[in-house]
Every structure is written in structure tokens, then in C-alpha cells.
Image: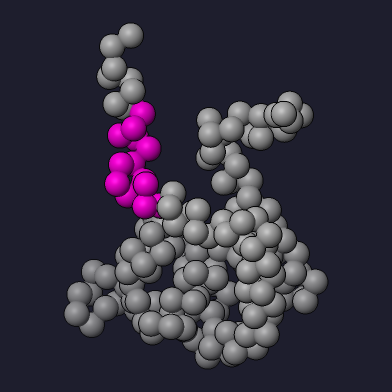
């Protein structure tokens, strides 16, 4: 039976975007609470950018966006605030001066090292949630694959083009 007090639950697939946003916001909010409880200034949205710079070395905003499959604007916004926090620095690319390349600062490298135990706890808790939810990560992979095959936009436009 649908829960009428919960719009997203009661509307099933029609509220898919709302459900995904809600889950994302809850994850981000809890992550932020963990950092605050540890007296650390770190924004959840920085994690993907930071991990890429740790694992891959210097990268451009576009390269990070492509790897994470998020918008250039999202990475650009996160990187600006990370730069203000002193975690990364950016400089013109030696190959193409129009592009800026981001790299970790000493402060960013130290933070990454110091945060490792906390991130291991995050990963363990996330794995536990994933298992409890029935391998949500696998389902999200399938959702990504389905949207790669035929984006939601195309699916909607095809239905709008159907005769009544």
C-alpha cells in the first residue's frame, strides 16, 4: 500500500528524480554532520574532485567532470570553494593555456592522509547501507546503463510525439 503522507513514495517511478535527490541530500547531510562532529571543514561535494586528484594527479575541470560524469559547472563550483579552502591550486595547462589544471596543495595532501580512517568508516557504512538496500549500487549501474542507451529526454519526447 502506498504511503500517502510521503509524496515520493506514493508516486512510484513518476517521482524517481525526487527520490534520488532526497537520498542524495540525506547522504550529503549525514556526511556533513560527521565532518562537523569531527570539527572538520569539509564539504561532501568536494569528495569526488579530491579523490580524482589523489588518484590521478593534476587534472582539468573538464577531465574531472568527464570521469565523474557530472557537469562542468558542478566541478568548477566545487573546485573554486576547494581552492578558497586551500586544498587545491589551479594553474594554466602547459599544453593549452586556455585550460586550467587543478592539483592538490600540501594542505590537500595532508587532509587526504588524515581523513583516510574517516573515509574508511564512510565506505564501510555505505557498503552496509548498500547491502541492506539490496545492492542499490548495482541497480544504479543498471539505471545509468538504461539512460545511456536511451536518455529520459528521448523517452519523454517519444511519448509526447505519439498520437492520442
70, above or below 52, in the image: above
Does residue 149 belong to the magenta stretch? Answer: yes
- Residue displayed at 56% across by 56% down: 136
In front of the other: 67 or 124: 124
Which quarter of the figure has residue 132?
bottom right
Find residue 162 and report its horizontal and vertical position in percent. 29, 17
Q: Is residue 104 left or right of residue 61?
A: right
In front of the other: 134 or 35: 134
Q: In the rendered image, is residue 83 in sight?
A: no
Q: Hey, which residue is sitting farthest right in the picture?
A: 37
Find residue 57 and report its horizontal and vertical position in percent. 38, 84
Does residue 31 belong to the magenta stretch? Answer: no
Which quarter of the figure has residue 101?
bottom left
- Residue displayed at 63% across by 69% down: 127
Q: Quadrant of the C terminus?
A: top left
Which quarter of the figure has residue 92?
bottom left
Find residue 27 and report its horizontal and vertical position in percent. 66, 58
Find the magenta span and give its range: 144-156
97, above or below 66, in the image: below
Q: Hey, which residue is sitting farthest left in the picture?
A: 95
Q: Is residue 93 left or right of residue 41?
A: left
- Residue displayed at 50% across by 76% down: 50
Q: Please state the total of marks drawn on the protein image.
A: 0
- Residue displayed at 61% across by 65% down: 44
Amino acid at each position: 500500500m502506498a504511503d500517502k503522507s510521503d509524496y515520493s513514495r506514493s508516486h512510484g517511478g513518476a517521482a524517481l528524480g525526487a527520490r534520488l535527490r532526497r537520498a542524495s541530500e540525506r547522504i550529503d547531510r549525514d556526511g556533513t554532520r560527521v565532518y562537523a562532529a569531527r570539527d572538520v571543514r569539509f564539504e561532501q561535494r568536494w569528495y569526488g574532485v579530491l579523490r580524482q586528484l589523489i588518484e590521478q594527479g593534476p587534472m582539468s575541470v573538464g577531465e574531472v567532470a568527464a570521469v565523474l560524469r557530472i557537469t562542468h559547472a558542478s566541478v568548477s563550483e566545487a573546485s573554486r570553494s576547494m581552492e578558497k579552502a586551500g586544498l587545491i591550486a589551479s594553474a594554466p595547462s602547459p599544453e593549452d593555456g586556455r585550460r586550467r589544471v587543478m592539483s592538490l596543495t600540501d594542505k590537500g595532501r595532508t587532509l587526504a592522509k588524515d581523513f583516510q580512517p574517516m573515509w574508511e568508516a564512510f565506505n564501510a557504512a555505505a557498503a552496509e547501507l548498500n547491502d541492506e538496500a539490496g545492492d542499490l549500487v548495482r541497480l544504479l549501474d543498471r539505471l545509468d546503463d538504461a539512460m545511456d542507451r536511451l536518455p529520459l529526454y528521448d523517452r519523454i519526447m517519444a511519448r509526447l510525439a505519439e498520437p492520442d
